[in-house]
Structures are given as structure tokens and as C-alpha cells.
Amino acid sequence: MSCSKCSPFAVPSSEFTPAEHPEFPSGSTNPCKLCTPLGACLAFKGIAGTVPLLHGSQGCATYIRRYLISHFREPIDIASTNFSEDSAVFGGRKNLHTALDNVGRQYRPALVGIATTCLSETMGENMPMLIGEYRGESRDLPTAAERPELVHVSTPSFKGTHAEGFHAAVRSLVGTLAGTAAPETRNPKPETGKAPLALFPGMVSPADLRHLRDFCAAWGETTITLVPDYAETLDGPSWAEFVRTPVGGTTVDELRALDRATAALEFGHSLATAPATAGTHLNSRFSVPLHRLGLPIGVRANDAFCAAMEAATGREMPARIAAERGRLIDSYVDAHKYLAGKKAVVYGEDDLVAGLAVFIAETGITPVLVASGERNRRLADAIHAAAPELRGRIEVREGSDFGDIETRIEELNPDLLLGSSKGYKLARSLNVPLVRCGFPVHDRLGAQRLQLLGYAGTQQLFDRIVNALLEAKQEHSDIGYAYL
Amino acid sequence: MTQPLEILPSRAASIAEVGKAGGAVRCGKVSVAGSVSQRACVFCGSRVVLYPIADALHIVHGPIGCAAYTWDIRGAQSSGPQLFRNSFSTDLQELDVIYGGEKKLERALLELIAKHQPKAAFVYGTCIVGLIGDDVAAVCKRVSAATGLSVLPVASEGFKGTKKDGYKAACEALYQLIGTGDTTGISPLSINLMGDFNIAGESWVIREYLERMGIQVVATITGDGRVDAIRRCHGAKLNLVQCSGSMTHLAKKMEQEHGIPFKRVSFFGIEDMSAALYEVAKFFGGEELMEKARAVVRDEVGKIYPQLRAWREDLKGKKAAVYVGGAFKAFSLVRALRTLGMRTAVVGTQTGDADDYDTLREMCDPGTIIVDDSNPIELAKFCLEQDVDLFIGGVKERPIAYKLGIGFCDHNHERKECLAGFVGMVNFGREVHASVCSPVWQFVPRRADRTRNAELETRNAGGRSLLAGDPTIASELAPTLRKTEDVA
């Protein structure tokens, strides 16, 4: 079951422009993606009391930690089963069990999120069996009551990107835990007696997550379960004392109770046509009504979000949200002449670039090139379904990287780049502004507080885009007016 | 603290306290699974060593992660080509894993070499290559024959050992180049600078000191590295090896095969930097050269000393935790911190050996914690117990320090600050001072609580003034207060 207002993404189309890599058909130059286990670790960081554990070499955990730390500027502990040559030959059973013991001892986690790597996947490690064995054995520590939940996700880095690893982990969490609450504790919120509204936001910033909570609360919807929810775990305050696993996150009990959700909302223009997601699981297994939406960036996408909220809650758009919507449209008008005819190159995860492209198109900027590292053949359809006016006017490149983007950049001659800090080198060589959004932002402070979602989040992004263009114009002018 | 932080039983032997009885620090072992080691892998070791060779093509053979995480993140600078700052990968996909990645690698190499015209190519093996059995060496040989270029396989499969094994694999690849260039015109007073990676131009600083002494630097390996310079570096008379962990293997090989002796040195801190220059002068001999070395040291120390003395006043008695990759850097940092008036209360490394830890025991004051292959929980525990004011480490350690309200100095490869040489000592002092003496700590809960508790105690004790009542707080706030006075 799906609401009529958010169905356009289901319309299939044959239009698809895969990146052809005229220069480098055999590999990647300056990637526009990361590996799947990174996405899984990020998703697990949004579950309360969770420690991610990578089944593979030590380096994977360390590299991913550093990459995430440089973006979030928060402690991000990721354990590794630490394969040696022996484990690669004889299997990683012992390593996995030792690692689970040690993670249990050190962190006393509520949940351990176990993600595989290219090494353990190529070896063909039978993870469900190994995890089952661990559960069955009587370990010295911790006691049965203290044992963490173990959730496994398969993330071979040779298949998919970090975004796909993220979605796979969310799906595993929901698939493993939803509907597992003991009957007497089935009512998840005894104090209100209300079943939750499930929201799968995708890879967004902690500030976006906080805003989504407020957004839904404005509808009177107080029992919202965000999966994952790293609003606090990856943007937390200074510590008064050492904290093993940061405060915050979706609790295991909240995950268990998702089978009773009144509705599920799942963001991602591209994810909306993916065959198996956390949302489709709740929908097909527990008949939870599912609304598959694009990332709510811009007026159109937020209107669709609001329509879904109206359908899920039976209430109309609250005045506060309507005011935010009004202000956003008002600013569109104020800025429209600055943006007319401008061209942008947008790169990053497929759901993000689709959301950004659909949004900027409605402001008068043309996303002349939309590039993502994914290769799932959904991106072009997703964009054109949500912004039909772009059909035939833009290039959509999947499986892309910065080497690929560079081959097109001169001809496209953009005024603006929109994406992660990895595009800085390109923006610098073109002498055009880069408006940083998404992941990673490694060269600025506050990446965890960048907002894109909701009318209010869009407002922040919109102001940044307009001001970046104004600043570029001002900087490049001989006169340098301070009154524009 | 609600629950005490425990040390894993399997980790206990890797921790020691100076002045307390106990055996050697357990080290040189594979990390304990699930301990959340700060170490990386074999690939990381190789990538760290070879990355700064600026005119070579570096291609990572494997899925995208290993190449993506090492794309242009280091502060290693080049005076010319910037090719090394790109990330090239075969980006192996599922079908490549099934059918093998050799053809893809060969095609990628041929295309990239044609496009970028590098001086050589390094092909890094990753975990998966070790499993699917791609014959990387054979591909390299074929491409080498087709292009006339040195195409060198680096056996850096992540799981085949530790970071140290990665250093060794990189040295083996480098050794393929050494001895293949023309050595004419090399001075009898000549050296190779090994194990300096030109972070923020550090190799240039050291090179300039040496040139003032009349020493020719044949090759910098690998900071601001060039393939042709490495080819002829066997013509130098001495190898000056910093970051001994990564380059000693190559230096020993060159000693055996080319008869070039090597000296292990460090360029961090006044003492070690001076000692390195004296070591070079002593090696080549003659009072004139020694006098030149003295002159460099005199000039440079004279320039920086007044500033260091001023900072020392503020930093006197402060405590530091040091957690770095190699032990030689740890030694230098203990000494450099002493120059700033600070005491090292915690010191650890990822790759130190038994001798290194013995040296640390001798160098450090009683009570100092020494640790091999530590992890976030241990480091946090030691920092809290020792109540340190500063943490020196890399990006992975930074949030541990900041969350607990501890100052931080990045001394890893990602940094963009020159910390080597005499000028580096000033930069180091500035960094340490800027962080330790920042006014922001007064708001951090751990310290604010302490101030509040002390205030309460003072009040209970009869309302003496806050500063007079608690010397610790007085010294903690002193720099901030002084700054206020300066403004007034």
C-alpha cells in the first residue's frame, strides 16, 4: 500500500545514461563513492549502544574510522576481527568470537553490528552460522541478560557503494529485529499507548535528523522512530566523564516494535524503486503502509513529504510548517533572477544528487550534470519522474568518478558545484564556487550541522547556494559593490 | 566515573608503568581481535611509504575502499608533479572477483600510463587480490615490456601481516629502482634522506640545513620523491634514516648490496635535529664540517630560543600523552616536550619493538604509562588517570582528546604543519601552546566541574579567593588571565 501522492517514482522509464568512462573504462580515477562497509558502520552508529564490528582486516576499520571522524569530528569506535593469514586460510570463526567477547567486555554494547568486508565475503564466510554458534555457546562474558543483540549485514565492497551499504544495514536491522518483542512488551510506548511512525531518512546529517524529529512533532506525532538516528551519537556534547557508546540513537526496543508502526516513510528518490528495503520489509511482512519519497529538499519534495504525513496522521499541515514553506517560496522569488540560467554540476550518492537536482531545478538552476558512484540504473528515472522538466536537458551519469566528471566539465562550463568536499580540487581549477553538502566534508567545520531537509533545511541550503553565486559575482567584479 | 574502565586481560602485558616492576612490554604482535586497535594494515604501511613519490603512478588493485580512503589526505608536498595526489584504482566488481582482475588491471595500467606519462608505476595489492590469485607480478612485467616503464608490484595484501610488513613490501618495490640510474656528478659529501615524507615541506627544511653544511642530498626517499633520483641514490655516501620503522629495511639492503652505511636519526625537536646534523658531520669527518654543523645549530637555535622560553613559562609542569606510529618519533616527542617544560605521562606506539620500549622506560619519569598497540578505551583511561593537558597523535586520537577536554597536537601524516627541524620546533611549540592554553577548556564539563568543585571546597573552607585557594586552578587559568592583562 502506497499513497497516491508519492507514487511517481514507481514509473519505469528506459532513459538511462551510464557513465561510459571514455578515458578510463578499466578503473576509477578519484572516486565519487566509498566502500559498502563504511555505509554500514555509519548506519550502525545510529543505533543506541551499538558498536560496529568489521569482519576482515584491521585496516578497513581504521581507514573507515578516520574517514568518518574527519567528517563528524566525533569519536567513532569500530572494532575489527583482525584477520591474519591464518584466518584467511582457515576461516575467521575464532577471530569473530574473540572479537565479540572483547567488544562485549570493553563496550558493554546493546547491539553489535557485524558487517563483512571484501576479504570475508570472497572467502565465503558463513556469517549466520558463525553468529549462531556464538549465540549458542556459553561465553564467559557477558551473562545471557547482558548479551548484545547481534545484527549481521553482508557488505562486500566489490558490490555497491557506501550508500548501498548504509541501506543494507538499515534493512538488516529492521529485518532482524522488527516484530521480535516479547508479547507482554508488545506495546512499545505504554505511557502513550501509541504505535510509532517509522522514518527511514537515509544518509543525512545529524542536524537534518533533529529537524525531522521536530518536523514530525509539529504534526503532533511524538512517537516517531528514526532508523538510524545518529542525531546525538555523531554530534554530541563534550563529556564530563568517559562514555563507552555515545548517548542517543534508535533503541533496540524501538526497532523491535516497528512491526506495529502506523506507517513507514522512506526517503530516497532512487531507493524508492529498490527491490528490498527496510520499508518494503515492514510493508510486505507486517502490512505497514509505506510511503516511498524522495529526500525532502525543495518545495515539491517537501510537499510530497507533507502529503505522506497527512495520509499517515490524518492531520493537515501544521501552521508552523506552512510558514516555513511560505518563507522558502518567498526567498525563491527574491533570488530567482540571480539563479536564472545558472548551471550546476551535482555529484554524490544517488539519492542525494537526485534530491538536489530536483530541488535546484525548481529554483531556475539547471543541474547540467548529475553524477553518482552507484550503478543501479535507477538514477535517471528517479530524477525525471520527480522533475519531468529536466528530461532531455541534463546528463545523468552513474558509476561516475571525478576523472569521469572532468571529461565533461569544460564543455558544460558550470557556474556552481554542489556536493562533497572531494570536488574542491575541481571547483578550484574551474574557479567556481563549491557549495558543500552531503558526505564527506573534510575541509570545513560543522558538516554534521549542515541542513538540507524540510522546508527549513532547504532554506539554509538555498541561502548558501544563492550567496555563493553572489559572492562569486562580487569577487570577480572589478568594481566590488557592497550593495547588491 | 560510573564504571571503571577495564583493560582486556589479553592486553595487560602490553602496558607498563615506569618505575614499577614488570617484564618487557609485549609488542610486535598481531592486534587482539575486537580490541579496536588504532593500527591499520599491510596496505597502509606500503601506501604511506610510497605515496609521496610524486611522478609515479600509484594504482590500487582492489575494490574502491582502499584507494578512496588514501586519496590526497596527506600533507606530503611535491615541488613539481602532482600526479601522486590522484586516486587510481581498478575498482574491482563482483564479476572481476569471480573471473579475476588481471585483464582489468592491465588495461587500466596501459590507459593510465598513456594518459599521465608517469616515470614509473606502483601497483598495490589489496586483501582480495591475495585471495583471488591474480598474478600481479606477471601483469606488471607485461605492461613494463609494452611501455618500457618500471611497473612495480607491491605485495601489500592487508591481512598478510601488520603495517610493518607493508613498510617492508614498499622497500622491496623501491629497491627494484635503486641502482638503475647514472651516478656521475655525485659529491663525496652526499647523503640520501630516507623516511622523511616532506609533510608540509619538512624535507626541504632538512635539505636546506644540510646544504648549508655543504652536503649534497641525492634523493629524498620518499618525501618530494622522484623516480629518477631514487634510481641513482646508490651513488650517495650515507643514508640518513628517519622514521626508522619504515626505511631501515631498505637502508640495510643498500648497506649489504651497495656498501652504503646508514645512520638512524630524527629531525623532531632541537636536541634530535642538532644530533642529526652532528652525526652527519662526524660521519664525513673534519673540524671544518663540524664547525659548519655547529654554525647551523647556533644560528637556528638562536632564532627560536626566546620564543620557546616564553611558551615554556606557560607550559611548565603540564602533562602530555603521546600515541604515535613509530617509536623514534615518540623518543623525539618526549624530548621536545621537555624542551617546552612538559612531562610525558603516557607514551605509546603502534609499531615499537622491545628495545624501543626499554629506551622509553629509561627516558621517561616514574609513573609514566608505556603502551603498545593501544585503543580508544585504554588511551582515554590513561589520559584521565594521568590527568594530561595535551594529547599528541593523529586524527583517530583527536576526538578522544577533545571529548575529554584535553588539548591536541596532530603529529601524523595528515597534518599540514611543518614540525621538523628548528623551524618545526617553533611550529610545534606554537601548536602545543595554542591548544593547551586555549580559553575554551574552562567551559568543557570535565574541567568546569573540577573548577566548580574546587570553588565549593574553597567556599566551605572559609571563602578564600578562588585563585589563592587552589594552585592547580591558578596555574590552569594563568595563561588566560595573562592574556587578559596583556589586552588591558
Image (cartoon, helix red, strand yellow):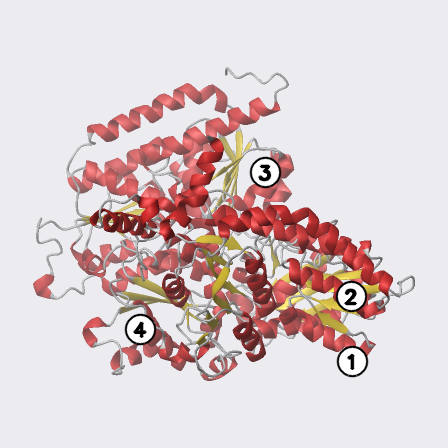
Is residue A332 shown left or right of residue A34?
A: left
Tell me the amino acid under the disc marked 1: Gln
Distance CA(mark 4)–CA(mark 3): 47 Å
Q: Chain of mark 2?
A: B
Residue at 65 percent across and 70 percent down: it is B244
Sort mark 3 into few (<14), some (14-19) or many (20+) by Cα contacts within 10 Å: some
Q: Tell me the tag on residue B280.
A: 2
Looking at the image, is mark 4 or mark 2 nearer the viewer? 2
Quadrant location, the N terminus of chain B: bottom left
Q: Give the image quarter of residue A476.
A: top right
Q: Tell me the tag on residue B256.
A: 1
Distance CA(mark 4)–CA(mark 2): 51 Å
Q: Chain of mark 3?
A: A
According to the image, label 4 marks what residue? Answer: A105
C-beta proximity under 8 Å, tags 3 and 2: no
Distance CA(mark 1)–CA(mark 3): 49 Å
Residue at 17 percent across and 50 percent down: it is A196
Distance CA(mark 1)–CA(mark 4): 48 Å
Distance CA(mark 3)–CA(mark 2): 45 Å
* Residue B33, image x, y percentages: 41, 75
* Residue A195, image x, y percentages: 14, 51
Sort mark 1 into few (<14), some (14-19) or many (20+) by Cα contacts within 10 Å: few
According to the image, label 3 marks what residue? Answer: A427
Residue reaching furthest right?
Answer: B184
